[in-house]
Amino acid sequence: MNDRAPVVIGAGPAGCRAAATLAAAGLAPIVLDEAPASGGQIYRRAPAGFTRHYRALYGFDAARARRLHTAFDGIQGSIDYRPDTLVWDLRRGALHCLSGGRSREVAYRDVILAPGARDRIIPFPGWTLPGIYTLGGAQIALKYQGCAIGSRIVFMGTGPLLYLVAYQYAKAGGGVAAVLDTTPFAAKRRAVPGLLSGGSTFAKGLWYVAALRARGIPVANGIRPVAAEGKDAAVAAFLYRDAAGTQRRLACDALAFGFGLSSETQLADLAEVPFAFDAVQQQFLPERDLAGRTPVRGVYLAGDGGGIAGADAAELAGERAALALLEDRGHEVGKPRLAALERALRQRAGFRAALEAAFPFPAELAAGMPDETILCRCEGVTAGEFRRAARALDADEINRAKAFSRCGMGRCQGRVCGPAAAVVLAAALDLPPERMGRLRGQPPIKPIPMAVAGTHE
Amino acid sequence: MESPQFRRLAESDRPRIRLVIDGRSCEALAGDTLLTALLTNGRRLRSSEFGDGPRAGFCLMGACQDCWVALDDGTRLRACTSFVAEGMRIVTRSDVDMSAPGRPERGTAARLGGKARSAKGALK
């Protein structure tokens, strides 16, 4: 059994590095990725026929993107790479993979999960209107399709992505109306000493803010979203309160928002990895050690899917998890390299904590969400309906509240509403969020055609 | 015709593709996702099943599942991860859609009218 090919799920920074490390050791990993090309979200490659070069697509990260793409392209002869493949279920020893409309079972003994992350959302009234996207979504429109999401765009929320995406739009001629940050300026200033450990990451952040201001784009701190207004069934204005508490109205035809990132954890859940509440990220995360080993034998975690740490850390974690897998299979692994990787990962964990302090998740926005706000966009459940169901039926746990209200039961499995719903529930019941538990992952982890669900090859 | 949601800033020098959106002949570019093809021609992908109006995608990375659109043969595709193809015929309007001009409220939309009105001017 020891000769069974290890499996890597995901071909972003963590998955690519894991695959390259395994390939270098003479193993031929199977790499399963939902996307048509490697790179993940951050180093997502443009479709065939697009011509913009690395500098235009990835900015400061152009060299990193090229290195990762080149490294992965270079091992194509020695790995079994399967793009356009959704792993929709994971049971002990078997992965169920959907590709080209057919489901196949892939047996595994060792698997490295590198599923990445998505935008973390707090709904506000009107957020389901056409023209409103996540920050990550706005970035994909530009990077992957050469399109702006509108002509007069408000960027709102918090986190490094807020300034990065707004800057990328400004540079591409994308009509940035304003950048509205929910974090008070004082919180950022307090976090500066910790952020300095991030070196160039911190410098890049400052540079984006300066570049936006130099273009005359208004940048405001400490704002509070109020609502998006629609006209002709699409977004037409964004209402917010400024740091002084004055309500303001900005006309716009598009809005991009997000409050940091949230880890994709469904596969770790199906693999029966135990979870623990992470106070820094305010999310239940699968347990793993610094090397990426989980308590489940043969299951490893790497990258943002195991906890948000960014692309550079994901590359290090991918390599470290692959080396852990090799160690566990009895391969000789260079100790100095292990020490260097772990030192670098520890240093980035410190920077990560400082970033959270600089751009804290504004849980109070979720707790105070107006009752009429659609909380679950899949099922059209409002915050008021969710609160009433939770209180009336004594649902003091998120899966119970889901069963009673349908919030989190829709197509996205709570990927969008889950983080905010846990806070809404906790506040409604006056309990700490970690007491609410977490939405359990269910197969299929994403929608698949009914016709393939029961058939396997 | 309503003005499109998305605006092309780059990569416009690609082969043209013809498609049909709600019976109207439209143009897109090879390499467009279905989402891009629809939103460079309009501002909607589908109607919410719960009567709160049209939707036009959200995450663009295959996580939120809000952009599943219907072809006129009944096929359903996730618009942000599917590429447009020559001759595709897409239907973005259904009978729960309240924003389509001249359509009476009925079905789910009528039952959930109270909820729909609470969406802060989201609907006409």
Image (cartoon, rainbow, N blue to C red):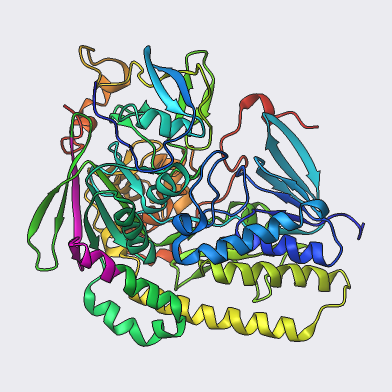
A64 sits to left or right of A366:
right
B119 sits to left or right of A448:
left
The front one of A11 and A107 is: A11
When asked about the image quadrant of residue A206, the answer is: bottom left
Quadrant for the C terminus of chain A, please.
top right
Q: Is residue A397 visible?
A: no
What residue is rendered at 79% in x and 59% in y? A110
When asked about the image quadrant of residue A191, the answer is: bottom left
Quadrant for the N terminus of chain A, please.
bottom right
Question: Percent from the top left, x then y, of residue A220?
Answer: 19, 65
Question: Percent from the top left, x then y, of residue A381?
Answer: 34, 39
Q: Is residue B12 visible?
A: yes
Question: Percent from the top left, x then y, of residue A327?
Answer: 82, 74
User: How many numbered dots are placed on residues in this image?
Assistant: 0
What residue is rendered at 34% in x and 52% in y? A172
Query: Image height check: is A98 above or below A327?
Result: above
A422 sits to left or right of A251:
right
When asked about the image quadrant of residue B9, the answer is: top left
Query: Image height check: is A157 above or below B114?
Result: below
Q: Does the stretch in magenta take in A212?
A: yes
Q: Does the stretch in magenta take in A125?
A: no
Query: Image height check: is A456 above or below B25?
Result: below
Query: Image height check: is B32 above or below A399?
Result: above
What residue is rendered at 74% in x and 57% in y? A74
Query: What's drawn in magenta, residue-wise?
Result: A209-230
A124 sits to left or right of A164:
left
Question: Percent from the top left, x then y, of residue A423?
Answer: 36, 59
What residue is rendered at 51% in x and 70% in y? A309
The front one of A128 and A17 is: A17
